[in-house]
Amino acid sequence: MTPKGHEEVSIVVHGQSVAVDKGVSDLVVLLNSLPGIETYTSCQGGEAKLKGKKMDPKGFVGFRGTSVPELVSKLAFEIARQEESGETELVIDAGRGLLRWNQRDYQQVLCMVKLAADRPALRVTKLMRGLGGPHYFQ
């Protein structure tokens, strides 16, 4: 158990065994399987207290590496597609290499990262800002 009360599982990342929250382990494994990406922090989110203080219920994973700009652009495309349908809340902090989501959206976030990983490199030809955030077109 983590200090936040989350069950942990051991996964192998770049040849080393590490413990991560069970509720985010699939995403951590997926991100670390991408060339040029490594995770450095994660939390599955949910209601928890640490030292008597209520923690942020959002899940998150931090990542870095040479492929961050490409992954961020692909995820932005997937987010724009999902925002149109209003299905999922996923926030990318590109400057810090951080994904944040509502815990209820974890499976959808995992699916979006899989789609982004499989998507060929994007060539953004037009970026429009409007209601609901940026919209990317190919």
Image: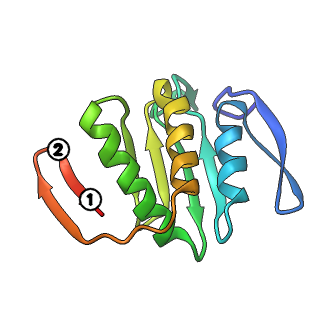
Residue shown at 37% from the left, 55% from the top: 76
Instruction: Specify whether residue 107 is in view.
Output: yes
In-front residue for pair 59/37: 37
On the image, which quarter does residue 138 sit in? Answer: bottom left
Q: Secondary structure at mark 1?
A: strand
In-front residue for pair 84/10: 84
Q: Which mark is residue 55?
A: none
Q: Which mark is residue 136?
A: 1
Q: Which residue is mark 2?
A: 132
- x and y percent of residue 79 in the render? 36, 46
Q: Which of labels 1 and 2 is toward the front?
A: 1
Q: Is residue 66 left or right of residue 130?
A: right
Q: Is residue 37 above or below residue 4?
A: below
- x and y percent of residue 111 in the render? 54, 38
Q: Residues within 10 Å of mark 2 (few under 14, many from 20)?
A: few
**Three-letter amino acid code at disc 1?**
Tyr
Residue shown at 10% from the left, 46% from the top: 131
**Three-letter amino acid code at disc 2?**
Gly
Residue shown at 83% from the left, 45% from the top: 11
Residue shown at 20% from the left, 68% from the top: 126
- x and y percent of residue 27 in the render? 64, 43
Q: Residue furthest bottom?
A: 66
Q: Residues within 10 Å of mark 1 (few under 14, many from 20)?
A: many
Q: Is residue 135 left or right of residue 74?
A: left
